[in-house]
Amino acid sequence: MLDSNIINFTKPSTFILLGIPGLEAAHIWISIPFCTMYTIAILGNFIILFIVKREPSLHGLHGPMYYFLCMLSITDLVLSTATVPKMLSIFWFNSREINFSACLTQMYFIHCFSAMESGILVALALDRYVAICDPLRHSTILTNCVVAKTDLALVLCSGMLTLLYPFLVRQWPYCRTNIIPHSFCEHITVVKLACADTRVSSYYGLFVVFSVIGLDVPFITVSYIQILRAIFNLPTKDSRLKTFGTCGSHLCCILSFYLPEFFSSLTHRFGHKVPLHVLVLIANVYLLVPPLLHPILYGVRTKQIRDRLLKLFTHKGT
């Protein structure tokens, strides 16, 4: 199949996305959980945004957490919407073509908002650390000005850090094939199609991954170690269990984001014996599962949001 599509060009007008190579016969069945997760993620994140916008009381003492939570919801919405609709069109309608510029745009959004999401998880960890370990200074440390500057820094840093991805990909000549053995335009997968020395792109991709994970994960780890120490010093068993349950759910969200991304990035470069369909499925996991889990574990498990949500449905029911 690949040999029949070998062509001579330097800039293809379109790429062909294969979906999940090797599992084409199961695309319809795979689309069912993917579509379900995407629908729940969209509804869940919109509900979080609606509740925080609708309830001014959430903008008070614990306002920073809800501002970061809203930013996380927006990031999840963009990240999943940049990939899943096209993925489902491949599964349902065999619509595999994607314009070269659209592919680069999708690539940029995926990696930019992934980096942004990592930064937001750090900000949420900092908020929880201050709220639990130094609650009396929470309102003075995390002021609205600090939150706004943090959000702006996250957007600018993520945007600038990943801007080189599409710029480098556009420079390479493509004279082998325009078939991408993936369900979306992942950076390293597209780079592998180029017929040039693309080590710059590969090394830069690793630099971005290790910069994001290497800086953010240690910070999150230290924050939650301090949080756990503070939890074990709480006076009553009930308060310890309640706080530990909340932090435990946050850690599940964090692991569901970092582990698949880290594994996917490394195996694409070094895991030559890992089946291709496994690599693609893992890459899809870190784009689908975190947006699904975040509204549940960060939002619904938060008492204030849960109470507003119940009140909203109760009023509608009456």
Image (cartoon, rainbow, N blue to C red):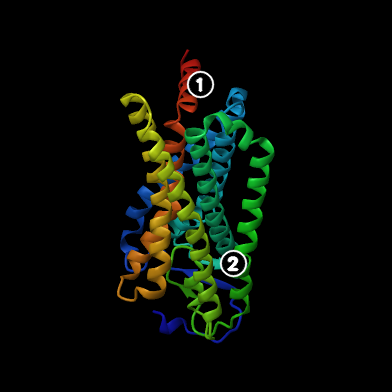
Q: Position of residue 270 (x, y in %)?
A: 38, 75
Please tell me which of labels 2 and 1 falls first in the chain.
Answer: 2
Q: Secondary structure at mark 1?
A: helix
Q: Is residue 192 left or right of residue 1?
A: right
Q: Residue at x 65, y 62 (%)?
A: 160
Number of other residues with Cα within 10 Å of mark 2, as a class: few under 14, some 14 to 19, many 20 or more: many
Residue sitting at x 41%, y 74%: 269
What label does residue 312 carry, if any? 1
Amino acid bearing label 2: Leu
Label 1 sits on what residue type? Leu
> Foreground: 184 or 237?
237
Which type of secondary structure does the marked residue at label 2 adopt? Answer: helix
Mark 2 touching mark 1, by CB under 8 A?
no
Give 14 or 283, whichever is nearer the viewer. 283
Residue 260: give x, y in percent of width and height: 39, 58
Q: Which of 56 and 44 lies nearest the eye of the viewer?
A: 56
Q: Position of residue 240 (x, y in %)?
A: 35, 30
Q: Residue at x 58, y 32 (%)?
A: 137
Residue 263 horizontal side relative to residue 63, left or right: left
In the image, farthest residue toward the top: 318
Q: Which residue is mark 2?
A: 104
- Tell me the quadrant of the picture where the N terminus can be found: bottom left
